[in-house]
């Protein structure tokens, strides 16, 4: 599944999917866009998008080991 920041904001269809799958985040971004200027909002969005790409963690379903790893 895509993250909130993986959708193409220029595409109305993808924007609708983004709002459907992430309604709380969508409402947050709508309010944020109203509060910030266009430049500030776009800078925030790009920074969050980059951070989301760096945080891409392998889901638990892809683990092959049946044991918990302990420190």
Image (spheres, rainbow, N blue to C red):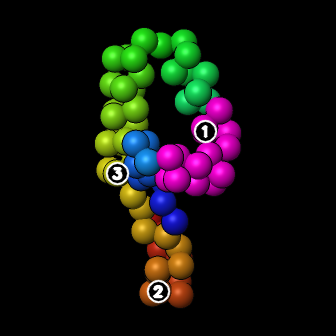
Q: Which residue is mark 2?
A: 65
Picture residue at 59% right of the left edge, 49% below the top:
16
The residue stretch that appears in magenta: 12-27
Q: Which residue is mark 3?
A: 53
> Is residue 41 at least partly visible in the picture?
yes
Q: Is residue 33 above or below residue 25?
A: above
Tags 1 and 3 touching, CB below 8 Å? no
Give the class, few, some or many, for how many residues have Cα within 10 Å of label 3's Cα (few <14, many ≥20).
few
Dot 2 falls on a residue whose secondary structure is: loop
Q: Is residue 16 magenta?
A: yes
Q: Position of residue 70 (x, y in %)?
A: 48, 70
Of mark 1 and mark 3, the one earlier in the sequence is 1
Give the class, few, some or many, for how many residues have Cα within 10 Å of label 1's Cα (few <14, many ≥20).
few
- Residue placed most toward the observer, 68 or 9: 9
Distance between mark 1 and mark 3 Cα atoms: 17 Å
Q: Which residue is mark 1?
A: 25
User: In the picture, which quadrant includes the C terminus?
Assistant: bottom left
Picture residue at 39% right of the left edge, 17% below the top:
38
Q: Residue furthest front?
A: 12
Residue 39: quarter of image: top left
Of mark 3 and mark 2, the one earlier in the sequence is 3
Identify the main secondary structure in magenta. helix
- Residue placed most toward the observer, 54 or 39: 39
Q: Is residue 39 magenta?
A: no
State left or right for residue 18 relative to residue 44: right
Residue 7, labelled with which disc?
Answer: none
State left or right for residue 36 relative to residue 46: right
Distance between mark 3 and mark 2 Cα atoms: 25 Å
Distance between mark 1 and mark 2 Cα atoms: 34 Å
Tags 3 and 2 touching, CB below 8 Å? no
């Amino acid at each position: 599944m895509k993250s909130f920041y993986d959708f193409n904001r220029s595409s109305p269809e993808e924007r609708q999917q983004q709002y459907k799958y992430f309604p709380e985040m969508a409402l947050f971004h709508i309010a944020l866009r109203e509060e910030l200027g266009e430049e500030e909002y776009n800078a925030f969005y790009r920074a969050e998008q980059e951070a989301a790409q760096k945080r891409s963690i392998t889901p638990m379903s892809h683990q092959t080991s049946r044991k918990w790893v302990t420190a």
